Amino acid sequence: MPIVLWIVIIIQFALQHFADGAVLLGIQLANALIGWYETIKAGDAVAALKNSLKPIATAYRDGTWQQIDAALLVPGDLVKLGSGSAVPADCTINEGVIDVDEAALTGESLPVTMGTEHMPKMGSNVVRGEVDATVQYTGQSTFFGKTATLLQSVEADIGSIRIILMRVMVILSSFSFVLCLIASSI
C-alpha cells in the first residue's frame, strides 16, 4: 500500500499538483513516524516483559530446596511443582497428583489431572496440588522446544508464500496503475 501512495505522490508532483502532493507526502511521513514510534514502544514493552518473566524453578540442590533460574535445570534434577507455578521443564511426577493447565500447549480449556504415569510439560501451569518431580527434558528437547523447531521450519515455507503474494500484488498494482492512466486520459 505505501508503494502505491509513493507512486501517487510522484505523479502529483510530476503533474505540478503541489498542494495535493504535499498533503499526501505529509500523510505518508506522519504514517512512517507513528509506525516507527509504535515499533520502538512495542520493543521496549517486550524487553520489559521478558525481564519480568524469567522462569524460576524450585529445585533440590546441595541438600536444600532453592529457587534457581529454570534455564539452569538439567535432566535428573528434582523440582517441586506447586499450585500457581509454571512447569519449568518436561518432568515425571515421582509421587502424588496435580492438576495442570495445558491450554498454552494443547488449547484444552480444562485442567488435566496428572499422576506418576503422566509427564507435565514445560509451558503448562500447575493449578492444584503439589508434587516432587524429576526433570526429564530441558531446552530444545522438551515438547515445547520441539514444537518451536517445527514452527521455524514452517516459517521458511511462509517466506516462499510471501514472495508469491508480493508478485501478485505488483502485477495487480501495475494493472490498476495502467487502468488509472487510461481512465485519466479519456
Image (tube, helix red, strand yellow):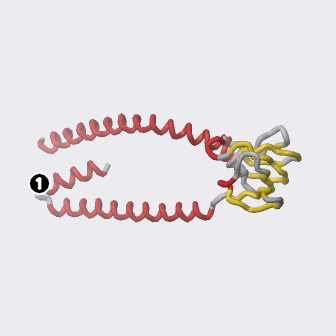
Location of residue 105 in the rendering, given as x and y in whole percent from the top left corner:
66, 43
The residue at the point 64 percent across, 43 percent down is: 144
The residue at the point 77 percent across, 56 percent down is: 59
Location of residue 10 in the rendering, given as x and y in whole percent from the top left corner:
17, 53
Q: Is residue 31 above or below residue 176?
A: below
Q: In this view, does 147 lie above or below 56?
A: above
Which residue ends up furthest to the right in the rendered image? 96
In this orientation, which residue lies closer to the viewer: 105 or 122? Answer: 122
Quadrant housing residue 167 = top left
Which residue ends up furthest to the front in the rendered image? 62
Type of amino acid at the residue the image marks with label 1: Leu
Location of residue 71 in the rendering, given as x and y in whole percent from the top left corner:
65, 54
Mark 1: which secondary structure?
loop
The answer to whether 60 appears left or right of 37 in the picture is right
The answer to whether 127 appears left or right of 12 in the picture is right
The answer to whether 20 appears left or right of 57 in the picture is left
In this orientation, which residue lies closer to the viewer: 93 or 35? Answer: 93
Residue neighbourhood size for the residue with mark 1, other residues' Cα within 10 Å, grouped as few (<14), some (14–19), many (≥20): few
Mark 1, residue position: 15
The residue at the point 36 percent across, 34 percent down is: 164
Quadrant housing residue 80 = bottom right
In this orientation, which residue lies closer to the viewer: 74 or 7? Answer: 74
Quadrant housing residue 65 = bottom right
Location of residue 20 in the rendering, given as x and y in whole percent from the top left corner:
20, 60
Q: Is residue 29 above or below residue 159?
A: below
User: What is the total number of numbered labels drawn onto the structure image?
Assistant: 1
The quadrant of the rendering that contains the C terminus is top left
The residue at the point 53 percent across, 60 percent down is: 46
Q: Is residue 14 above or below residue 150?
A: below
